[in-house]
Amino acid sequence: MNSFVIKTLRGKKYIGLGHPVFIIAEMSGNHNQNIQRAYKIIDAAVKAGADAVKLQTYTPDTITIDSDEKYFQVKVNKDWKGQTLYNLYKKAYTPWEWQPKLKKYAESKGLICFSTPFDQTAVDFLEKLRMPLYKVASFEIVDIPLLERIGKTKKPVIMSR
C-alpha cells in the first residue's frame, strides 16, 4: 500500500506517496510523569501544525527486567548514565490509564493520536482504544510475534529502519 486515509475532525488525512508531508509530534517520555505536561505537549503539537501525536505503549515490566546487572545499566547520556533500564523506563513510560484521555484530548484538537506498542499486550490494549494506525520502532522490526499481532489489526503501519 503506497498511501492510506485517516478520518479526523479536520476531515480526511491522506498519508503516503503523492500526499503532503505527515508531521508527527513524538510525546515519548517528555511528559515527565505529569499528565498536565502531556496535555501541554499536545497543545504545542497543534500550535506547531502537527498532524498527529505519537505515544509509546509499554511498561517497565513489559520492556525489560528489574536487574542491577551491568547489562541492564545505562552507559550513555550523562542524565541517564548509571541508572538501570528498568528505572529509566519507569520514569519514561506513559501510564496506560492516561492513554484514553490523551487520545480523546488530541482528537478533540484535531490531531491523529496513535502509538508504538512494544509487545502484544500493548497492541491488545491499543485495539480497545481504537488506535487508527501503529508505529513499529526500529528495534522491534525483528519481533515477529509483535509484527504478526499488529498485522492482524489490518491497520496502517509506519516502520522505522
Image (spheres, helix red, strand yellow):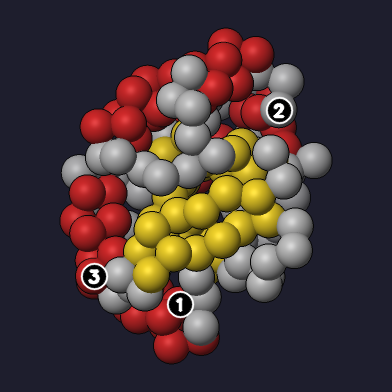
Residue designated by label 1 = 45
Secondary-structure class at tag 3:
helix
Residue designated by label 2 = 141
| First of labels 2, 3 by sequence position | 3
Q: Is residue 146 visible?
A: no
Real-space Cα distance between discs 1 and 2? 27 Å
Q: Please tell me which residue lies in front, 150 or 156.
A: 156
Vertical relation: 157 (above or below) 9? above
Q: Are marks 2 and 3 in contact (CB under 8 Å)?
A: no
At 41% from the left edge and 45% from the top edge, which residue is drawn? 132
Amino acid type for the residue under numbered disc 2: Ile
Vertical relation: 112 (above or below) 141? below
Secondary-structure class at tag 1:
helix
**Figure quadrant of residue 41:** bottom left
Direction top: furthest residue: 145
Q: Please tell me which residue lies in front, 24 or 78.
A: 24
16 lies left or right of 149? right
Real-space Cα distance between discs 3 and 1? 13 Å
Q: Are marks 1 and 2 in contact (CB under 8 Å)?
A: no
Residue designated by label 3 = 108
Amino acid type for the residue under numbered disc 1: Ala
At 71% from the left edge and 27% from the top edge, which residue is drawn? 141
Indicate which disc residue 148 carries.
Answer: none
Percent position of residue 16, x then y: 68, 56
Percent position of residue 15, x then y: 61, 58
